[in-house]
Image (cartoon, grey):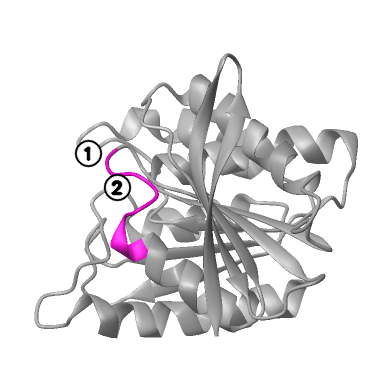
Amino acid sequence: MTSKEKVRIPFEQKELDGVFSVPDGFAKGPGLVLAHGAGGDLNLSQLENIARALARAGVLCLRFTCKAINLLYRIKAYGAVVDYLMTHKRFSPSSLFLGGRSLGARAAVAVCNQMCAEHQDVVRGLLCLSFPMYQPGKPQTYNERTEGLRALSQTPVLFVSGTADSMCKQKDLKTLMEAMESISAVHWVIGGTHGLAVHGRSEDSVLEEVNAHIISWVLQHK
């Protein structure tokens, strides 16, 4: 059994909508912050499904909404959410994981670098769902979008991407992972698009596959 708890997260002069997915009887355990991409919000079915599966496995998950597409603003918002989680009176986790989908993953990478510059092992793992290595048709954006990943030194990274994702081609992600200092792993969703949609498969079927890998990875590194 799991439960959900809606929260309002202070950020600058306003508040962000957030929701905890809480494992049954949660006291202390790993926690993951999970951010949506350029479109959608915390109610994106993919992220809700992942959060629910993680909570069933004993992992606290906090999703939040920040609809701004400016990366620097997203990074600030993500940092505020992490601060909120780590100082929460009831749900402060024993170990911290950061994650996100597409633009949310880029923000997670940036916040991870900021935090690890102060405390090297503070982030136990980084989850990148459909990481957008470049804009479609603009390979010149590769270096800018991947520099944060290449700057990581110790934080383990899990990539989850579709083999038909035009923003994350297999050969390019392989090259990136070889250049990274941090340990990294990837789960490829065969036929998956940037949204991890697969022709002929339901979203639940795809996410059942994805969730098994995410849960195993989080529990391995907690």
Q: Position of residue 137 (x, y in %)?
A: 20, 35
Does the magenta portion include 35? no
| The disc label shown at residue 136, or none | 1
- Residues tagged 2 and 1 counted as in contact (Cβ below 8 A): yes
Q: Secondary structure at mark 1?
A: loop
The residue range painted magenta reads 39-46
Instruction: Give percent across and percent down for residue 11.
Output: 60, 24
Instruction: Answer left or right for 72 relative to 205.
Output: right
Relative to 50, 119 lies left or right: right
Q: Main secondary structure of the magenta part?
A: loop
Residue at 43% from the left image edge and 33% from the top image edge? 66
User: Could you say which disc has been placed on residue 210 in the image?
Assistant: none
Residue 166: image x %, image y %? 23, 51
Q: Nearer the viewer, residue 61 or 164?
A: 61
Task: Kindly indicate the quadrant of the structure image that contains residue 221.
Answer: bottom right
Cα distance between the residues tagged 2 and 1: 6 Å
**Residue 169, quarter of picture:** bottom left
> What residue would you read off at disc 2?
167
Q: Does residue 110 sit above or below 210 in this rendering?
A: above
Amino acid type of the residue tagged 2 in the rendering: Met
Quarter of image, res 114: top right
Crowd class of label 2 (few under 14; some 14 to 19; many from 20; radius 10 Å):
many
What residue is rendered at 87% in x and 52% in y?
Answer: 121
